Amino acid sequence: MFEQLLSQQMADNPQLQALVSMMRANQTNEDHGADEKTRELESLKSKLHRAVGQMKQMRAHIEMIESHLSAVENKQENLAGAIGACSFCLGEDPDCRACRGKGRAGAFIPDPELFERYIVPALKKYPQPLFSSPTN
């Protein structure tokens, strides 16, 4: 009904016809622009979703690496205790905050339990004693 009335008015008024044509063209452009913005928004949402997924995977990898690092640090600390060395650098780093490179094996009294667990089994593998007994 409205369209019919508008058509009648436009037939009698060329200025109204031009104005309505411009409004319809503008509406079409706005619809096209809205469609484009919707597609762009969907594309950005998809990229964000992928990025979040990648971040979750990276977080899982970081947690796994942190777990492995913690295990390695624990083993290094145990071995250092077994040989009486600095648990940070084993005496190999002159810039070490704990020993300044002076914490090589034997620098400290070894932990008896750790020595028994890690060193004694290795020493038992030698077919002959590593240290000769002083003879009198």
Image: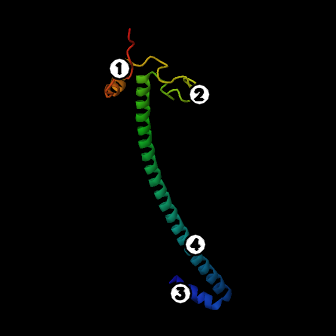
Q: Check disc 3: other Cα within 10 Å, few if <14, some if 14-19, many if 20+.
A: few
* Cα distance between the residues tagged 1 and 4: 75 Å
Numbered disc 2: secondary structure: loop
* In the foreground, 29 or 79: 79
Amino acid identity at mark 1? Glu
Numbered disc 1: secondary structure: helix
Q: Earlier in the sequence, mark 1 or mark 4?
A: 4
Residue, disc 1:
113
Residue, disc 4:
33
Q: Mark 1 or mark 4: which is in front?
A: 1
Q: Mark 2 or mark 4: which is in front?
A: 2
* Cα distance between the residues tagged 2 and 4: 66 Å
State which quadrant residue 71 falls in.
top left
Query: Residue drawn 59% across and 28% down?
Result: 94
Report how many numbered discs are placed on residues in the image.
Answer: 4
Whole-percent x, y for residue 9 in the image: 61, 87
Residue, disc 3:
4
Whole-percent x, y for residue 73 in the image: 44, 32
Q: Earlier in the sequence, mark 2 or mark 3?
A: 3
Q: Mark 3 or mark 4: which is in front?
A: 4
